[in-house]
Image (cartoon, grey):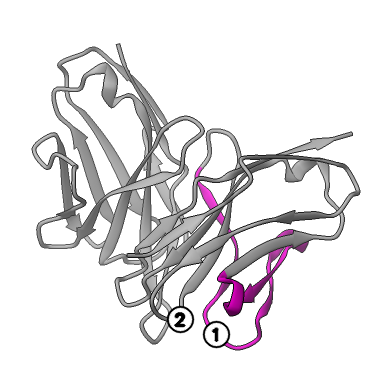
Amino acid sequence: GAVVSQHPSRVICKSGTSVKIECRSLDFQATTMFWYRQFPKKSLMLMATSNEGSKATYEQGVEKDKFLINHASLTLSTLTVTSAHPEDSSFYICSASVPLGGSYNEQFFGPGTRLTVL
Amino acid sequence: AQSVTQPDIHITVSEGASLELRCNYSYGATPYLFWYVQSPGQGLQLLLKYFSGDTLVQGIKGFEAEFKRSQSSFNLRKPSVHWSDAAEYFCAVGAGTNAGKSTFGDGTTLTVKP
């Protein structure tokens, strides 16, 4: 199956700093990627849909100025958490969408990035 | 709007015993349904999916799931659980026309007793 990587796998930063998380599709091109946030013992919450070459579409309640998404190429999407605060600490997971025929696109998930803001 | 309910937050089974994880969904049309497994600190791995056709679908690692439209359910089963199956399991419903965007249930934590 398709492989999606994330970097870094774990990051600790000070409050007020910005952190960039990369999501890469390693062996395929992904025109669409998704960013999720997962709290401990909780489900995945979709934050935004990242489309190559265009602006990301954010879900309701997600601050677009706080969580900057860039999808500059068909294999890379980045999520930048700006001016991070402790409440931004979470597990961030990306997925890449691969069309498999008809209207269906399968998602392949990255391994996640654990962000801790001190 | 689509939604997914996983009624069981935590399930404990003995190794070798059978397993059934419940999933109920709400969706206006024929849903795309998925089961994922997540090990601690890891991303999600697709176990199986249902689009149409045979309502009993086979997945990886010996898992299967049955789609029951009348009950709006898509329960995951495994006849004999292995200790390595201990993980978090998520059911998801996908809006197929929306490039794979999915809504996830809250997950069920599976503990396997020796």
Question: Taking A15 as reference, is B5 above or below it?
Answer: below
Depth order, front residue of B99/A7 = B99
Image vertical order of residue A24 relative to residue B62, above or below: above
**In the rendered image of this protein, does residue B16 appear above or below residue B49?**
above
The label number, if any, that marks residue B52 in the structure image: 1
Q: Are marks 1 and 2 on the same chain?
A: yes
Residue drawn at x 41%, y 32% as measured from the top left: A39
- Foreground of the two, A73 or B45: B45
**In the drawing, what numbered circle is on residue B93?**
none
Point out the tag, 1 or 2, that comes first from the N-terminus: 2
- Residue position for label 2: B30
Q: From the viewer's perspective, is A114 left or right of B16?
A: left
Q: Is residue A25 magenta?
A: no
Residue at the spot x=83%, y=46% of the render? B82
Q: Which residues are magenta?
A: B43-72
Say few, some or many: other residues with alpha carbon within 10 Å of mark 1 (under 14 / 14 to 19 / 20 or more).
Answer: few
- Label 1 and label 2: CA atoms lie apart by 8 Å
Query: In the image, what residue type sits under mark 2?
Result: Thr
Identify the image quadrant of the N terminus of chain B: bottom left
The C terminus of chain B sits in image quarter: top right
Please say if B103 is above or below B53. Answer: above
Look at 34% across and 51% down and name the residue there. A24
Question: Where residue B13 appears, x then y in whole percent?
Answer: 82, 42
Front-most of residues A105 and B4: B4
Say which element carries label 1: loop
The answer to whether marks 1 and 2 mark residues whose Cβ atoms lie closer than 8 Å is yes
Q: Position of residue B48 (x, y in %)?
A: 61, 67
**SS category of the residue bearing label 2:** loop
Q: In the image, residue A33 lies at what x, y percent?
A: 29, 58
